[in-house]
Image (cartoon, rainbow, N blue to C red):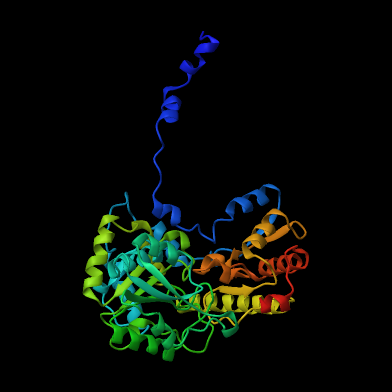
Amino acid sequence: MARAGDMRQSRPFSDRYCMLVPMPKVSERSLKMPASPIRRLMPFAEEAVRRGTVIYHLNIGQPDVESPREFWDAVQNTGLRYLEYTHSAGRTDLREKVAARYRDMGIEVEASQVMVCTAGSEALAFAMMACLNPGDEVILPEPFYANYLSFAMSAGVEIMPLETRIEDGFALPAVSEFRAKLTPRTKAILINNPGNPTGTIYDPAQLDGLRQLALERNLFLISDEVYREFNYTSSPVLSILQLEGLDEHAVMVDSVSKRFSLCGARIGFLVSRNKAVNENALKYAQARLAPPLLEQLGVLGALDAPKSYFDQVREEYRTRRDLLVSRLRAMSGVVCPLIDGAFYAMVELPIDDSDRFCRWLLESFDHRGETVMLSPATGFYSRPELGLRQVRIAYVLEKDKLNRAMDCLEAALQTYPGRVNVTAAAKS
């Protein structure tokens, strides 16, 4: 047995070594990487569930509509005995089928111009790395999908935000405002149409203005179009690949996650007629080897879903949108603009701090044993203070649950200790 004076000798060698040698530090890049505003409150939600509170999750774009039967049939009847690698750009038959689907929509592309990615997220990352050098600048309207900032930081790209305003329905700024943001380092414009988090759809005249600017200044025009089917207007959503003269400038990102309620499948597409973009994006695809095979087979089946599937899905989300807007506009001090597409609303609330409010909803509030989880808008802006009184709401729950979630929000706004006077808020 060791004597008292020898206790230090009984300490494990690894512990004694760590006391003497400095620990390695993580990268500055990772320290600067922002946490997801959509997921960072999950520990508080988990604790609320442990207390027995029912949570309505309106914080994340996870659809609850059933995926098409054709997907499940394809996955369950592969006949495979093992899962092999596929081509780094994805299965040829899937690329051909996707290209044919785009042509049916009036988007003229060939299979060689379609790359299958591990979700739209990877497609966006590949687009940035293939088109932009470290230090290059990309202009994008804000509020923007929070992960754009993460993708840009990973690629060493500088985000140049162009603010849109809730009082204008988050409309796309005039081309003159984009022009004012240009510098010698500007290499691209990035848009999301229909938009996350705003639900805004850009009309053809606005897109044509961006087309002219891209041609004039030789810029890439990158468009995230994953919410194309979620369109509640009477006019179709125009793809940038339908704009004249942009064969060398347009890069489109797409995904099956929302369209088919297949968020977990992680299949997306990078589409461009620019041969150099495709060839160099393929190098990054080769580095990660291949997109997942089983999910590709499932998506091959899902693409056979009838038009009625999308019609029903669109109508379901239209009614959810109408319910949400009606409930929000009936709440004192709440500002909810018109929502044209996607399934998100960026809403202004009579609160002092959206981060504090969203955490309070999980830590300190319940309405008849229930509460609602929202995304603070601070993470959707380059400057968090712009989203201080805004939240993003994903209306992805069926109408009864959505109504109950709105009951919770209405009750919360009446008791939240940080509620602010609406008039005072407008003046600040």
Measuring from the top left, give residue 396's x and y in whole percent.
58, 68
Task: Please indicate whether residue 413 sits to the left or right of residue 242 in the image.
Answer: right
Specify whether residue 224 is in view.
no
Q: Residue furthest bottom?
A: 205
| Quarter location, residue 295 | bottom left
At a point 58% along the width and 54% down the height, the residue shown is 42
Measuring from the top left, give residue 174's x and y in whole percent.
45, 88
| Quarter location, residue 78 | bottom left
Q: Nearer the viewer, residue 315 or 145?
A: 145
| Quarter location, residue 390 | bottom right
At a point 41% along the width and 37% down the height, the residue shown is 23
Specify whether residue 241 is in view.
yes
Task: Please indicate whether residue 23 sits to the left or right of residue 92 in the image.
Answer: right
Q: Nearer the viewer, residue 234 or 277?
A: 277
Is 340 rendered above or below residue 279?
below
Task: Please indicate whether residue 409 sits to the left or right of residue 316 in the image.
Answer: right
Mark count: 0
Measuring from the top left, give residue 365's x and y in whole percent.
73, 57
